[in-house]
Image (cartoon, rainbow, N blue to C red):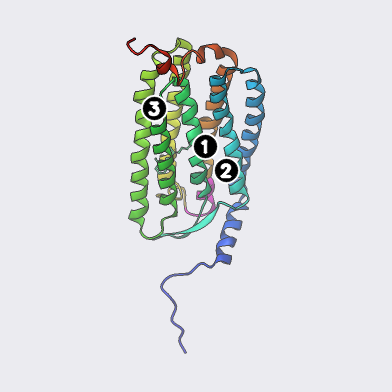
Amino acid sequence: MVVPTPPFTVVGPLQADDLVAEALSNALLASSLWLNVALMGVALLLFTYLGRGVTDEYARLILVATIGIPAVSIASYLGLISGLTVGVVDIPGRGESVTLWGRYLTWTFSTPLILVALGLLAGTNVTKLFTAVVFDVAMCVTGLAAAMTSRALWLRWAWFALSTAFFLVVLYVLLVEWPRDVADQDPSVQRLFGRLKYLTTVLWVGYPVVWALGTEGLALFGTGATGLAATSWLYTLLDVGAKFVFALLLVRFLATERPVVTRHGLDRERAEPADD
Ligand code: RET
């Protein structure tokens, strides 16, 4: 008797677990994840130590948002290392691929913290801060959808395009609105904001580029363990700049020049006379 074989292979839960376990046992991939846990652990202790003398409420708010960045990151990377947020997705035309989808999920929590810290530093208002955070969260969630879609290849890129559109709103607030707000502030705040703005823009643009070239997108570095590790290393390097360097510059500034930061804040417009 001839048993008909289906034109596709079905990956059961056990087989998917095996694929994930195999991917995570790759030394190159594992090192890219552990490096981040170690670095963010150091960052958490260092920033808490450096920020211990910051007493002003407004400066402390920026500090808490900044210290939250490595805190979320440690949880994010431990989630990946433990396999909790790693899965298998059937990419049309390519087959079963391991995806570190937890990244996109945890960006939903870490990137708003970066924007809150930056927006508060610029002395922006609640509306602009809310706009940046809402579109940033939308960017991360649709980025997650792009990575998890298996129905059609074009649908993955449709999610990618939607996520990019949301990203453009974030970039608009960062590059057009906040520089206007920060213009009212002390030159030292303006200088720091300028540096952080460029650092953030250049590195954040790197993320969709890595997505498009890496295992979720065109798979230019290959589809197997090496491709996954190469993609992961690129994200890790971006993370070091976008989180560690960013937060270090900000915390160091808050710890040394805090009185200047507190002169303007979210309350500024309320505190000024209406006809001023
Ligand atoms: C995705 C893919 C879809 C299109 C776009 C993306 C943008 C991601 C960005 C991520 C930034 C992450 C940071 C993490 C720090 O913890 C989701 C990759 C536009 C900008 C800074």
Q: Amino acid at mark 3?
A: Leu
Residue hosting label 1: 110
Residue hosting label 3: 174
Give the left or right position of residue 25, taking residue 176 as reference.
right
> Taking the image as drawn, is residue 124 in sight?
yes
Of the numbered discs 2 and 1, the one sitting upstream in the chain is 2
Q: From the Cβ of disc 2, is ligand 1 less than 8 Å away?
A: yes
Badge 1: how crowded within 10 Å, few (<14), some, or many (20+)? many
Residue hosting label 2: 76
Q: Amino acid at mark 1?
A: Ser
Q: Is residue 55 above or below residue 32?
A: above
Of the numbered discs 1 and 3, the one sitting upstream in the chain is 1
Residue placed at 41% from the left, 73% from the top?
7
Q: Is residue 112 above or below residue 176?
A: below
Q: Where residue 269 appears, x then y in whole percent?
A: 40, 17
| Marks 1/3: CA–CA distance | 17 Å
Badge 3: how crowded within 10 Å, few (<14), some, or many (20+)? many
Ligand 1 quadrant in view: top left
Q: Is the C-beta separation of discs 3 and 2 under 8 Å? A: no
| Figure quadrant of the C terminus | top left
Q: Can residue 226 be found in the magenta stretch?
A: yes
Of the numbered discs 3 and 2, the one sitting upstream in the chain is 2
Q: Is the C-beta separation of discs 2 and 1 under 8 Å? A: yes
Q: Amino acid at mark 2?
A: Ser
Residue in front for this viewpoint, 275 or 176: 275
Q: Which quadrant would residue 77 be assigned to in this image?
A: top right
Q: Magenta stretch?
A: 223-231
Q: Can residue 63 be found in the magenta stretch?
A: no
Residue placed at 58% from the left, 17% from the top?
56
